[in-house]
Image (cartoon, grey):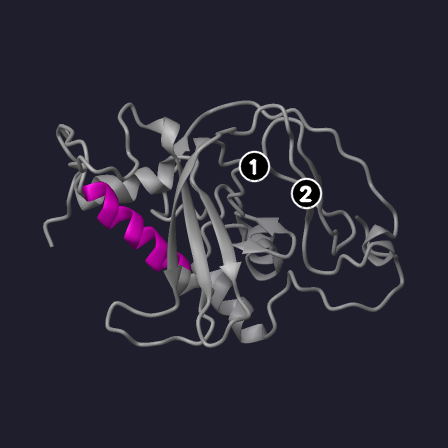
Amino acid sequence: MERPRGRAHRDRSRPRAAARAAARANDAILGTLTGDAFTAAAAEAARTAPPRENGGNQDIKNLTRGTRVFYPVFVDGANLSVGDLHFSQGDGEITFCGAIEMGGFIDLHVDIISGGMETYGVSENAIFLPGGDVGPRYEQFLAFSGTSVTLDDEQRYLDSHLAYQRACLHAIDYLTKFGYSPEQAYLLLGAAPIEGRLSGVVDIPNSCATVYIPTSIFDFDVTPGKDGPTRIDPGQGAPRASR
């Protein structure tokens, strides 16, 4: 979506202070760029490592084949790049690089909707129509809730990030009862196509988040029952840092 020309706007892709731009130029790692091209890119380009208003590293697992994405365009002559393909990933990619990475090819078709940002009220976000033919489909889930209270019983007002973290920790605690190590359970939540949801953000002071694990990714019954959890052989286990 292209912003109408001649309309005043704040260019969010540029640093807000000359000092920050200079510092960024000194520290930037920009592949083969050198000289003036390096300086200009370091001072003006928008970093795509974090998610941001023009896209960035959003890690949305449902963006599969057939997806349509409508991105705002902030500058004339803007470029488009795509990458970081995942074979499988849980919502949030909670282990940072915990998705199953993959190589691949992406076939794109690009259209410009002139004035689309103003027409559709898109100023700092993207709009998605996820592809429906290859997304993960599961019928049964085991869900865990979490609230915005720390492990030290400190209440954080409507902290949805904390609530999701606690939901994931509850899922990890549960999976260890079946024989997984905590590290294995943690990695599983990052790589498996779990569903993460904000379930309550209005009932002050606590927010509630939930994580849904599809039961069919396991080759044993992972649901609670009167006979207790099935114990598995965890195998070699996950690597652990020395400290």
* Residue interval drawn in magenta: 164-176
Nearest to the observer: residue 226 or residue 11: 226
Does 20 sit above or below residue 177? below
Amino acid type, label 1: Asn
Amino acid type, label 2: Phe
Decide: marks 1, 2 in contact (CB < 8 A)?
yes
Q: Is residue 98 visible?
A: no
**Label at residue 62:** 1
Q: Earlier in the sequence, mark 1 or mark 2?
A: 1
In 3D space, how far apart are the residues under numbered discs 1 and 2 (Cα atoms)? 10 Å
Q: Circle 2 sits on which residue?
A: 128
Q: What element carries label 2?
A: strand
Does 152 sit above or below residue 238? below
Nearest to the observer: residue 182 or residue 211: 211
Q: Is mark 1 on a helix, strand or loop?
A: loop
Does 174 sit above or below residue 52? above
Q: What x and y, as percent, mark residue 100?
A: 38, 32
Q: In which quarter of the image is residue 101?
A: top left
Q: Is residue 80 left or right of residue 96?
A: right
Q: What x and y, as percent, mark residue 164?
A: 41, 57
Q: Which residue is drawn at 87% across and 57% down?
A: 4
Q: Which residue is drawn at 30% across and 69% down?
A: 150
Nearest to the observer: residue 92 or residue 9: 92
Q: Quadrant of residue 152?
A: bottom left
Q: What x and y, as percent, mark residue 144?
A: 37, 50
* In the image, residue 24 lies in the stretch drawn in magenta: no
Provide the major secondary structure of the magenta segment.
helix
Q: How crowded is mark 2: few (under 14 residues within 10 Å), some or many (20 or more)?
A: few
Q: Residue at x 19, y 43 (%)?
A: 176
